[in-house]
Amino acid sequence: QVQLVESGGGLVQAGGSLRLSCAASGRTFRWYDMGWFRQAPGKEREFVASINWRGVSTSYADSGKGRFTISRDNANSMVDLQMNSLKPEDTAVYYCAADPRAADPRAAKEYTYWGQGTQVTVSS
């Protein structure tokens, strides 16, 4: 069992930066694949970024390539999402997700555990 708690969301102007953090409970965190997803009002939840359990394989949605960076600290059971050059279209609730082995890390259905989400609002 893994519990996830996101933090770091907020209101930022376009072009600004935010760093989202996801704190995980459980001693087995280091074995879990991790992902970030987001959901804007009226839209489906979409993939943002993922990192495998070893931290050596990452994947990004095209919308965030070159702007977002996912990282993990297994010693402290944390996974972060650094978001730079934010755009109004990045406005959404951002969710952290975990799974012992996400066969397709870009697919929300692959993840067993989810956080409650943190709101990111980018003003123009």
Image: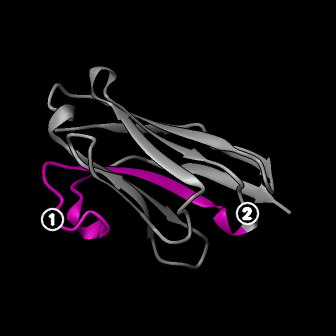
Residue 120: x, y in percent?
65, 52
Q: In this view, does 117 lie to the left or right of 27?
A: right
What amino acid type is highlighted by mark number 2?
Lys
> Is 105 covered by the magenta stretch?
yes
The region drawn magenta spans: 89-113
Question: Which image quadrant: the C terminus?
Answer: bottom right
In front: 48, or 84? 84
Residue 34: x, y in percent?
30, 48
Q: Is residue 53 left or right of residue 47?
A: left
Q: Indicate the quadrant where residue 73 lies.
A: top left
What amino acid type is highlighted by mark number 1?
Ala
Residue 16: x, y in percent?
77, 48
Furthest residue toward right:
124
Q: Indicate the quadrant where residue 5 lies.
A: top left
Asked which colour scheme the image uses, the reply is one colour
Q: Mark 2 points at which residue?
A: 87
Furthest residue toward top:
75
Residue 103: x, y in percent?
15, 65
